[in-house]
Image (cartoon, rainbow, N blue to C red):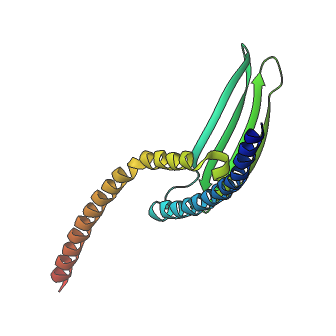
Amino acid sequence: MASSLVELNALLDSFVPLSKKVSIAEIKVLEKEAEALDKILARVWMLMPCLYDCHIINRRELVPTGANSGFAVSNRLTLFDGGSHRFRSFVVEQWGTDSPAFEINDSKDISCKDAIQTYGFDAICAGLAEMLKCQCNVDVEYGNLQTRIKKIDSLIQVLGEKFKAECRMEA
């Protein structure tokens, strides 16, 4: 019995410092992920300033409580004001013909660190990637703008030549 107590004591002695190391490492990971997320968001908004009010994470669970009633819980992470603000929205709503409808909405600004604690770094990065994939219309818009530039350049050239011709006719 004495040897098992010694072994248990030795294991506990090694476990306590290890659990402290894990706690310190978790804090460090969170801080590093928050720093990385801040830089990622800065880069996203520098490259794509046309994005505004983008839902990065939109979790919604619908729970029916009857034939024509139910409730929903939504938890959303949104970027707005050019990415400088992260906004967390938590909504509980109930609807139906059997009971009166209501909605409770708790929304607030959220730091990168708090966003990571709430949603997870990987989930936020995946949400950003999906958001950027949905911006494929930017390529189409760029092509349309390039076409318009060529048309306007042609028009300016024609008008410039007509103006020169008209000036020569007057002279």
Q: Residue furthest front?
A: 2
Q: Percent from the top left, x then y, of residue 125?
A: 52, 50
Q: Is residue 29 visible?
A: yes
Camera-nearest residue between 117 and 165? 117
Q: Percent from the top left, x then y, of residue 84?
A: 61, 63
Looking at the rendering, in which quadrant would you find the C terminus?
A: bottom left
Q: Residue at x 72, y 16 (%)?
A: 68
Camera-nearest residue between 48 and 168? 48
Q: Give the left or right position of residue 76, taking residue 150 as reference.
A: right
Q: Is residue 81 visible?
A: no
Q: Percent from the top left, x then y, of residue 127?
A: 52, 46
Question: So how many labels did they put on this image?
Answer: 0
Q: Residue at x 75, y 35 (%)?
A: 92
Q: Give the left or right position of residue 140, taking residue 22 as reference.
A: left
Q: Residue at x 74, y 45 (%)?
A: 6
Q: Give the left or right position of residue 165, taking residue 128 as reference.
A: left
Q: Residue furthest right?
A: 100
Camera-nearest residue between 83 and 166? 83
